[in-house]
Structures are given as structure tokens and as C-alpha cells.
Image (cartoon, grey):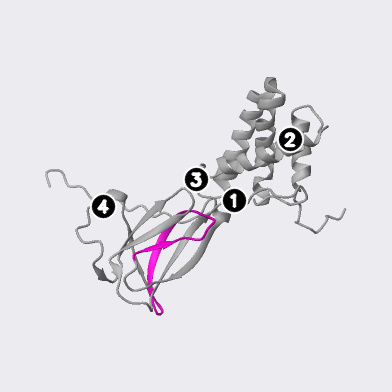
Amino acid sequence: MATSGTTAFDLSIDRIVERAYARCGMNIRTGYELSAARDNLNLLFSEWGNRGIHLWKVKNTTTNLTAGTATYTAPSDASDVLEVVFRNGNTDTSMTKISRSEYENLPNKTSQGTPSQYYIRRNLSNVTITLYQTPDTTDTQINYYYVGRIEDVGAYTNTPDAPFRFLPCLVSGLAYYTAQEVAPERSQELERRYEAELQRALTEDSQSTSVHIVPRNFYPGG
């Protein structure tokens, strides 16, 4: 028997909604129910933003620096900034992330030189990066990775802004959110299924790197 030879399976938003309602033991009957399901999907994506770093939303960008300017705004879809390097021509130099308190205690925040530290401020409508020292030249850059927000659901014919690995927990999550409103007797069971499937997806959505553990010699009395 032949296989399909394709690996393009995906679900449009309206089909995700149908599958979620089916798990609640119901069919969609009104436009209000479809609209409510879309709202719940957007709420679900917002909640995923609190579940750690999603690798498919990690992006890289570069910002040109201006002499005398310390604070720069990340792209509009940024939720957080992960790591920053100072770029001078073809040379990248790692920078140290500091906390708000550490930045506040710097004695001269306007001191100009080569930036070696940065402070991230997550505001209501944007994310800013404040450098220390303040750049003293305009021909340098910062290059950084940031976590982008998951895109809104949009039209019902769209596909979700999530990889295929997350489709099972996406359907389960919407079913759980929907059940709280239309089938509360099923919500506890659907929550357990959702959390289990989401955990499996989050575990898979991680970077696989080698870890080397070197034992430390210990000499009694040393």
C-alpha cells in the first residue's frame, strides 16, 4: 500500500472550532458560538504566552545605535527579549542582562562608551531595551533574539500561528475553554486532557543540546 507522500496536514480555524465543540458533545448552531470560539482561541494563545518560550516565535533582529541614545524599542510583536550582543562591524560582543534595581543603582546612566549591559522593560504596549553605557557612536548595532507574540486568529479560514505539534493541544485547549461556558460537566475531564497534551508539546518544543558534567575533585581536610 502506498503512503500519501505529503506532510502538510493542518487545520483551519473553523475546523478547529468544530473539533472542539464535538469534544464538548455539541455542534455549532449560531454565529455567536463561532464568534465566542474565536475569542476563546485568542485567549488561549494569550495564556500560552505565560507557558514559557515557544521556539517557533523566537526571532532575530538588528537595531542601529545612535550616539547619545540609551533606550530602543523592540519590534511591535515582541513579548520579551532573550539575549543581546553589541555589534561593531563584523565583531559581536556579548552583553550582560541586568535587573531594574541594578540599572537604577548605576551612578551615571548617561555615561557614553561601548555598551556592555542592558535592561529590559516590558511595558503595556511595547518592550524597550536600555543600554549601559550609552552608545558613543552611530555606526554600531545591537543584535538580539526576542520572543514574538502568537498571531491573532483572524479569519475563520486562516490556519493557526502554531506548528503541527501543537494542533492536538490547541483543539483540547479550545474544548476546555468552551466547556466552561457550554458544558461545565465536561470541563474537568477536558482540562486534564488539555494539560497533558500541552505538556507533551512544550516538552518537544525545546532545544536539544549536549550537557557535559565534570566531577570536582574533593580532598578531605583540604
Please name the residue that numbered disc 2 is placed on: 20
Q: Give the main secondary structure of the magenta stretch.
A: strand
Q: Is residue 73 magenta?
A: yes
Please name the residue that numbered disc 1 is placed on: 150
Relative to 123, does residue 169 appear above or below in the rendering? above
User: What range of the chain is rendered magenta?
Assistant: 70-91
Residue 104: give its label. Answer: 4
| CA separation in Å, label 2 and label 1 | 20 Å
Do labels 4 and 3 touch, CB within 8 Å? no
| CA separation in Å, label 4 and label 3 | 27 Å
Q: What residue do we see at 79% from left, 58% from top?
A: 6
- Of callouts 2 and 3, the N-terminal one: 2
Q: Quadrant of residue 184?
A: top right
| CA separation in Å, label 2 and label 3 | 24 Å
Comparing marks 2 and 1, which lies closer to the viewer? 1
Q: Position of residue 110 (x, y in %)?
A: 25, 65
Q: Quadrant of residue 120?
A: bottom left
| CA separation in Å, label 2 and label 4 | 48 Å
Please name the residue that numbered disc 3 is placed on: 52
